[in-house]
Image (tube, helix red, strand yellow):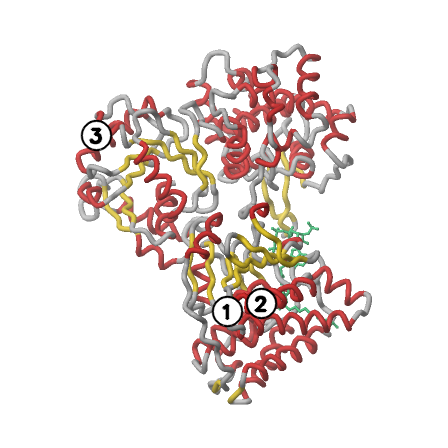
Amino acid sequence: MGSAIAALIANSSCQVVLLDIASNNPNDRNSVVKKAIENIPKQRPPSLSHPSKLAFIKIGNLKDDLQLITECDLIIEVIIEQIDIKYKLYNKIIPYLQNDAILASNTSTLPLKQLKENIPDSIKSRFVITHFFNPPRYMELLELITDQAVVPMVVDKITNFLTINLGKTIVKSNDTPGFIANRIGCYLLELVVRTAIKANLNPVIIDKIFTDLLKFPNTGIFGLYDLIGHDVMKLISTSLVNSLPMNDQYKKIYILTPILDKMIAKNLIGRKGVGGFYRISAINKVKTKEVINFQDFSYTAIEDPKVEYNSINELLDSGSIYGQFFKSILVEFYLYLTSLIPEVTDNIYDIDKAMRLGYSWKQGPFELLYNIKDGFEWLKKEATIKNLPLPKYVANNNYKTIDSSKFQVSRINLRESEVLLKNNSAQVLLYQDRLVFSISTKMNCLNEEVFTLLLEAVDLAEQREQDLYIVPLTDNFSAGADLKLVAHYIKTNDFTKLDRLLELGQQAMMRLKYSHINIISCAVGFALGGGCEILLHSDFIVAHQELNAGLVEVSRGLVPAFGGIKEMFYRAQGNKDRLIKNIINILTANKTSSADYFILDYGISSAQINMNKQMIFLEASQLTFPKKVVKVDKKITLPQISLSEELDISQYNELQILLLAQLQDIIALQEIDEQEILERERKIFLELAQNPKKDLAF
Ligand SMILES: CCCCCCCCCCCCC[C@H](O)CC(=O)SCCNC(=O)CCNC(=O)[C@H](O)C(C)(C)COP(=O)(O)OP(=O)(O)OC[C@H]1O[C@@H](n2cnc3c(N)ncnc32)[C@H](O)[C@@H]1OP(=O)(O)O
């Protein structure tokens, strides 16, 4: 994980030093760290936002290069979870720490108290635990563990670095084993897996219920166990069980399960092994997902199971085997969860946040309990039937003070904004003194109403002489044109509406580009198709590093038609190489995987990258923009290139070849202005849209 954390820091464009053990090879003492560096670009999912970020990582070994530590403000120890080995390392590095440098351990199992036992007092005040989640580039959660000895200035400094520079959301946890997320997450994993194996239940059905009814990530519980690795789960749980108090329920559910031990012995440890609860095989050359049979460890192909219940309440009331199973594990789980308050944390919203951001649950456990009819009353009743003692939090009715509006807090608190304009798909807000346009459709998809209000928003911004910020209030900037709506129009032959959408889209993009106020787009999540076209027509983009943006239309059997083709020509400004690159973006439906890639692949010149998606708008609103110099639509010269010679067309499909021919026709014009390309773009779109092989449906 050390190299993945180094990569995350490099992604933020901060300098980072990666020190690993010195190799025995006298000719190359850095061979171990070099191997780690070589592996960074191979990590999946990718740890680096762009290969160029490797330049931010300096390497060394823990024998010859300790002086590099003197250059560092923060030293994160990411080594094996053995206290003696950690002590040895601390003794080595402490003499090289700057007076105000912070020392942090990324331990997931050892308490801060124990880590500090042999540390000089002068270091105790700046020694904390920073618990990253794997993979660190993608998981937003960071558990921060401090104690009385740590001075507030240190807490502020590290909090700023982790949130602003690295984009993490910090949840403070007490210094208890497993902290918050793993204590709860691993308990649930062990509880479900061990109870289900004992009852010989089917992992596929259990996982399906977790994903469909409880909205867990697609891996479910057994899939996650495989992903973490049965060997690693054993290490984590053993360590937890050894450090938890005698009467902790984790010890009781961590029962002997010979099947799990046999699986480890057979290297059936999950994705890293020869299989796990699941495995992917090639059956008749078809990739097939299989599930294990616990009796003989053979595998059977999975047929997509149907869950016959519409809600968790229906399942729990059903009295079926799986209904009873879920009733029993949910009662056990919630009694355990509530027994952790206030020992692990007294903030239940932090518990929910930790499970959402560290385990990717759609809802945290407390919010989830709201989905169960009379959740806490149900829990009390079931616990009483089973004669189980109620934790204080439940027995004292403390849960009655839960404020459900605090579970998922949106990026901008709408209650603080004045709504200036609004329709069913978008709104214009006055947030403090900033004009904000935000879309409110599913995935912020674009329809006539969005464009109509966007046009009105630009009018309003111009009247008020104020810049306009385009800000998503949810996790995505925009997934582009509403393809469900487009498919519906096509099905009902409503070509007037289709034409109107196309016209409005193009008009809105040109209005953004040629208005005399600045248009600032705050780009997070997906900005695809029309979403990307809005970015291309904005004056400035503040982008989250984890942005996925691109003109992906060709992958849907369409072509960009809200000015995307036009911008790719226009932005090349006569430069041959840039034009070829831009055409490849369209042809290959280049969906970039980070803001770094988007800026380079799409030739974006006015953008700033931010690591923290919660802070994108804050950052945008703090920037000052010069008065916009409205561009003049001049003719651009088109470099005379032959696309069939410049590109390897053998790899392209029918639509791509047809599109290439149309783009070549534009190039043949030699000189063109923006309006002319836009008209061409519309013509190309309509011509190619007749191609019947289209799959707009989801
Ligand atoms: C003779 C014919 C003439 C035709 C003339 C037509 C003229 C019409 C004018 C249109 C001009 C368009 C021009 C523009 O340049 C083109 C575009 O913008 S095309 C759209 C490009 N965008 C995409 O292809 C993105 C599609 N979406 C995705 O790939 C994925 O959804 C995602 C964004 C990667 C997210 O993936 P996930 O996180 O897994 O989420 P889901 O896929 O489950 O999505 C959640 C939810 O949202 C719905 N949804 C997503 N994108 C769209 C969309 N573009 N339109 C409609 N709905 C969308 C998705 O279906 C899910 O819905 P649910 O299942 O929850 O109901």
Residue 589 in view here: no
From the viewer's perspective, is the residue at label 3 or at label 1 nearer? 1
Label whose residue precedes the other's in the sequence (3 or 1):
3
Label whose residue precedes the other's in the sequence (3 or 2):
3
Q: CA distance from mark 2 to mark 1?
A: 8 Å
Residue 174, quarter of picture: top left
Residue at 78%, 26% in the rendered image? 318
Label 3 belongs to which residue? 91
Residue type, numbered disc 3: Asn
Residue 124 horizontal side relative to residue 659, left or right: left
Say if 389 sits above or below 321 in the image.
above
Residue type, numbered disc 1: Ile
Q: Verify CB contact (< 8 Å) between mark 3 and mark 2.
A: no
Residue 42 in view here: yes
Q: How many marks?
A: 3
Q: Nearer the viewer, residue 30 or 142?
A: 142
Residue at 46%, 85% in the rendered image? 639
> Where is residue 155 drawn, in percent x and y?
34, 35
Kind of element beneath mark 2: helix
Q: CA distance from mark 3 to mark 1?
A: 58 Å
Say if 55 sits above or below 71 in the image.
below
Residue 124 horizontal side relative to residue 220, left or right: left
Residue 517: numbered disc: 1
> Where is residue 102 drawn, in percent x and y?
28, 37
Residue type, numbered disc 2: Val
From the viewer's perspective, is the residue at label 3 or at label 2 nearer? 2
Residue at 45%, 75% in the rendered image? 629
Label 2 belongs to which residue? 458
